[in-house]
Image (cartoon, rainbow, N blue to C red):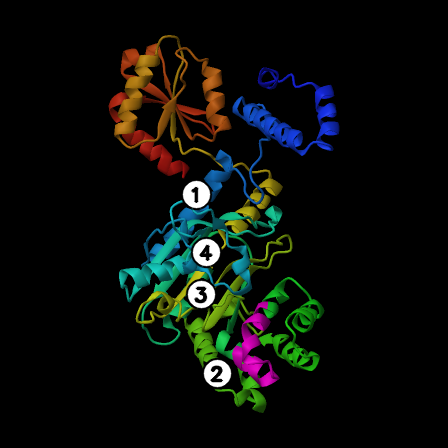
Amino acid sequence: MLRLIRNNTFPVVWKRNCNVLMSTTPQIAEEVAKLLDLKAQLGEENGCSHKLILKTPKGTRDYNPEQMALRLGVLEKIISVFKRHGAETIDTPVFELKDVLTGKYGEDSKLIYDLKDQGGEILALRYDLTVPFARYLAMSKISSIKRYHIAKVYRRDNPATTKGRYREFYQCDFDIAGQYDPMLPDVECIRVVCEALEVLNLGPYLIKLNHRSLLDGIFAACGVPQSKFRSICSAVDKLDKSPWEEVKKEMIDEKGLDEHIADKVGKYVSQSGGVELIAELRKDKELMKQSVAVQGLDSMELLLKYCGIYKILDKIKFDLSLARGLDYYTGVIYEAILCGDDVGVGSVAGGGRYDNLVGMFDSKNKNVPCVGVSVGVERIFSVMEAKLANKGLKTRTAEIEVFVASAQKNLHEERMKILVDLWEAGVKAEQSYKKNAKLLAQLQHCEENGIPLALIVGEGELAKGEVTLRVVSTREETRVPRSNLIKEIRRQLKTLS
């Protein structure tokens, strides 16, 4: 019988008869189950258990060379902004102890990816870069740092890949940790967002601002029980994606809030503006009875003043509907959105102040005040890819500056000698890996790949100690002495740039 199984010739009729026997003899049924299990195992060992489906897991994607060139270009520009503001970089493990992550994200904690226990530790994939950063500060006893961190994070979310929402994605964080005077680090983080969006040339954008203390004051003034502050905050956070009626329904049906209290909250969170909104809210006697609301308004007034000094006030909107549902925010919060007609990706950056997070990991509950921002690079990539596709533009996938070509046969060794000189001079160069490639094919390669210069080696030029330098875009050619080659290439590249 085992021989039949191993040869994959298990008779169908025998199986049918077994089904009949199983109904009368439990012992036979048990033995048949064992045999069928053995057959399945043998099939898996021989690689024939099922047909392999080639696909990326849900909420993930591969990136081809053109997409990677675009991504790296975006990251380089963002990093240049971070460095301009004095940030240094760190890295942390892609997974953490699960206890480090739980209880920090409010309702979003259900999106944390658990890892199967392999070594006596209960682990989970990191959800963001902020909580690992706070853990790093507490472990390392660091009381002040300005850092950026670019790495992948993981969320068990419902992906919307056309809008740049994935389960595996990059975050691009800039944070300032330390005890400083009010709003000075906060306004710089907002300025960093503006500079990043400007350098990426994404079109018009708006940065919404609010303050968690002000939101808590509003909830208290409306009669929201303090135990429901965080859950109501999470509901308000959905106003950028859902209409008020849906959010109100969630507050009443799911959060257990009285309808008249929900209506009061709705009147507040529908307001937005600038400095004039602060003046208007100060006239609200019920709100002004809440000390946290007064504190929040004072902070917002100072922040808007500093935004004016940093020349970003025209990009700012004080919006009471902005809530950011994560539990760890304690002060100012902000979110950047693109305003173009053809853009539908939601926010492309967000952040705020989180003064108590580090203390959660410190044995003596020692807090390190922090404020930061996360740039949503995946959504930015989606926008930029769509814009390039609409314009029919291609992104260069390599940075080759010079292609060394030959006009006749058996000159590949001469090409190699020139290549060594170029590489040693720091010039990005390549050649065909065919000894006797046709010149036309070599020049077509340059045009198709956007290589700016072609260096053509010919027998006549070699005899004179020269090469031909060709500008690929104009097809203009000049003879250049070998002794002056590097200097002339640099001059041409500077002209073409």
The quadrant in which residue 400 appears is top left
The answer to which of marks 1 and 3 sits earlier in the sequence is 1
Query: What's the amino acid at mark 1?
Result: Leu
Query: What's the amino acid at mark 2?
Result: Val
156 falls in the magenta region: no
The answer to whether residue 381 is left or right of residue 268 is left
Separation of marks 4 and 1 at Cα, in angstroms = 20 Å
Query: What's the amino acid at mark 4?
Result: Asp
The answer to whether residue 2 is left or right of residue 183 is right
Say which mark, if any, is on residue 128.
4
Whether 381 is drawn above or below 174: the answer is above
228 falls in the magenta region: yes
Disc 4 packing (10 Å; few <14; some 14–19; many ≥20) = many
The residue singled out by tag 2 in the image is 292
Nearer the observer, disc 4 or disc 3? 4
The answer to which of marks 1 and 2 sits earlier in the sequence is 1
Which one is in front, 201 or 440? 201
Whether 112 is drawn above or below 436: the answer is below
Q: Secondary structure at mark 4?
A: loop
Say which mark, if any, is on residue 388.
none
State yes or no: discs 4 and 3 in contact (Cβ < 8 Å).
Answer: no
State yes or no: discs 2 and 4 in contact (Cβ < 8 Å).
Answer: no
Q: Is residue 284 visible?
A: no
The quadrant in which residue 37 appears is top right
The residue singled out by tag 1 in the image is 72
Disc 3 packing (10 Å; few <14; some 14–19; many ≥20) = many
Rendered location of residue 22, percent (x, y): 71, 31
